[in-house]
Amino acid sequence: MASSTVIPTRMELTRLKNKLTTAIRGHKLLKDKRDELMREFLELVRENRRLREKVEKGIEASNRNFALAKSCMSDEAVRVAFMAPKQGVSLDVSYRNIMSVDVPQYTFHTRTSDENDMYSYGFAFTSADLDDAVKSLSGVFPDMLKLAETEKSCQLLAAEIEKTRRRVNALEHVMIPQLQEDIKYITMKLDENERSSQIRLMKVKDMMLEKTHHYTEKEEKWAEEKIARENQQMQ
């Protein structure tokens, strides 16, 4: 149904046609964007699943080694071993653009490059299982960071996909059909007005012809009467 506020003029018709052309082009671009976002999203979901399985296995191995270490060491010895950490980690955040969505990228830097600095204790009074637990956590840390990056990217892409999907549906099912209906309504109104104008012009022409014809008949009648009077006078 055409909008009740639409004005059936040629200028409005031109404006609505331009608006419809823009809406159709925007609808196509948004559909392409949605499809590309879905492709990127599915790739990230697969990567997220792979990383999560890997991280869970690494954490499970670390917990198992840590439990073995606690069984061989006292709680006090474990607390003392981690009381003064030697290594530090700094985190940097950058962003990359995926179809107008800024997704994070995490990179980390250790305070020192020596791998042995991750052990904050001496090896004389600790078990090898504790070393394995620390090493397992250290090895899984980059994957944990990558997992956090991937999960956040998935959340941002999912929100953008939903927003784009709503826009595509609004254009496809509301705006474009409404514009087409308004254009059809204005076109019908303009055609109706044109037909009405033609009918009025035809009526005016008929009236003028009729009026001209009556004047001609009157002039002929006057001429005949004049000739008749002159003939009477001559007789």
Image (cartoon, rainbow, N blue to C red):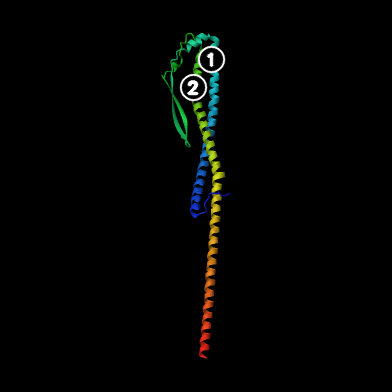
Task: From the viewer's side, name the closer residue of 225 and 70.
Answer: 225
**Residue 153 image point, x, y percent:** 50, 31
Q: Quadrant of residue 116?
A: top left
Above or below 51: residue 191:
below
Look at the numbered disc 1 and give the secondary structure of its residue.
helix
- Crowding at dot 2, Cα within 10 Å, few <14 / some 14-19 / many 20+, comes out as some
Q: CA distance from mark 1 to mark 2?
A: 16 Å
**Residue 2, horizontal then vertical, whole percent:** 56, 50
**Residue type (three-letter) at the residue carrying disc 1:** Phe
Q: Residue furthest right?
A: 1
Q: Say the numbered circle drawn on residue 108.
A: none
- Residue furthest to the left: 112
**Above-or-below relation of 131 to 192:** above
Q: Position of residue 180 (x, y in %)?
A: 55, 50
Q: Earlier in the sequence, mark 1 or mark 2?
A: 1
- Marks 1 and 2 in Cβ contact (< 8 Å): no
The residue indicated by pointer 1 is: 66
Q: With 129 as the anchor, is 112 left or right in this view?
A: left
**Type of residue at label 2?**
Phe
SS at badge 2: helix
Q: Looking at the image, is 36 positioned above or below residue 119?
A: below
Which one is nearer the viewer's eye here, 64 or 16? 16
Residue 141 - label:
2
- The structure residue drawn at horizontal position 54% and vertical position 53%, both measured from the top left corner, is 186
Regarding residue 61, the answer to whether it shows in the image is yes
Q: Residue at x 54, y 20 (%)?
A: 59
Outermost residue to the front? 233
Task: Inspect this view and state whether residue 38 appears.
Answer: no
Provide residue 47's location: percent of width, then percent of height. 53, 30
